[in-house]
Image (tube, helix red, strand yellow):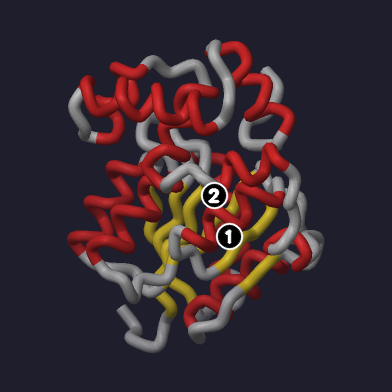
């Protein structure tokens, strides 16, 4: 492989989406693309051969993209990870940057944004899609946002999984933690978010754009 090429690991569970982004990224002639359809496959691929830039969707089967970001950054704190997602609420964008992402690309952005994001990440620069206001990184001083901000990274990942209909047992398996730990985190999440039922937790996630309707 040409050492001058930017090695990109593209992570999305939809083969058609990966194929489209792969063609887009390869058009410039300076990128070589590897693919993965899940967080587990992506982490194994990163361990075998670290990519210059990892580009991951947030919504992946099993372990999500946010947890993949945590694992890659825990293994290599200099790893460059871009997040792309159809979910682009202010809180979620801030959360990904707080977790160590070097860029966020909205799936509603122009295709050229992905190419620009990968090149910016490779050059060590932060990137935010042109269709997203940089005020997103500082927005949200209301009580609900403060409650969300109070969640640790692990608590937030459990919150997202619970909001997607996962059980505490599912969270334990997907995040490689004990069922007791998952249950304790679930209790803390509900307390911090001031919700007492699973339905209320789901409604909060919908209101804040953490998950999509349906």
Q: Are marks 2 and 1 in contact (CB under 8 Å)?
A: yes
What SS does tag 2 mark? helix
Quadrant of the frame with the C terminus: top right
Q: Is residue 95 above or below residue 184?
A: below
Above or below, 210 relative to 111: above
Instruction: Identify the residue shown where x is 60% and y is 77%.
Output: 28
Q: Say if 42 sits above or below 188 in the image.
A: below
Residue 1 found in image quarter: bottom left
Residue at x 64% of width, y 48% of height? 91
Residue 102 x, y percent position in the rendering: 51, 70
Residue 172 percent across, percent down from the top left: 27, 26
Front residue of 124/7: it is 124
Q: What residue is disc 2 on?
A: 19
Q: Position of residue 150 (x, y in %)?
A: 52, 45
Q: Which mark is residue 23?
A: 1
Q: Quadrant of residue 126?
A: bottom right
What residue is at 32 percent from the left and 63 percent from the top?
73
């Amino acid at each position: 492989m040409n050492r001058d090429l930017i090695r990109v690991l593209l992570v999305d569970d939809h083969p058609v989406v990966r194929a489209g982004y792969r063609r887009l990224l390869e058009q410039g002639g300076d990128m070589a693309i590897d693919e993965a359809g899940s967080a587990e496959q992506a982490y194994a691929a990163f361990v075998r051969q670290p990519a210059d830039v990892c580009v991951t969707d947030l919504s992946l089967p099993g372990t999500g993209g946010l947890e993949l970001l945590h694992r890659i950054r825990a293994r290599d704190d200099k790893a460059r990870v871009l997040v792309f997602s159809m979910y682009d609420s202010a809180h979620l964008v801030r959360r990904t940057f707080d977790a160590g992402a070097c860029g966020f690309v909205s799936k509603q952005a122009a295709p050229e944004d992905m190419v620009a994001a990968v090149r910016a990440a490779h050059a060590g620069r932060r990137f935010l899609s042109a269709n997203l206001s940089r005020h997103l990184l500082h927005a949200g001083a209301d009580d609900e946002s403060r409650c969300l901000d109070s969640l640790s990274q692990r608590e937030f990942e459990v919150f997202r999984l619970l909001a997607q209909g996962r059980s505490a047992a599912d969270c334990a398996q997907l995040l490689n933690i004990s069922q007791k730990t998952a249950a304790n985190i679930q209790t803390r999440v509900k307390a911090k978010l001031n919700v007492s039922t699973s339905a209320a937790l789901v409604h909060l996630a919908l209101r804040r754009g953490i998950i999509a309707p349906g």
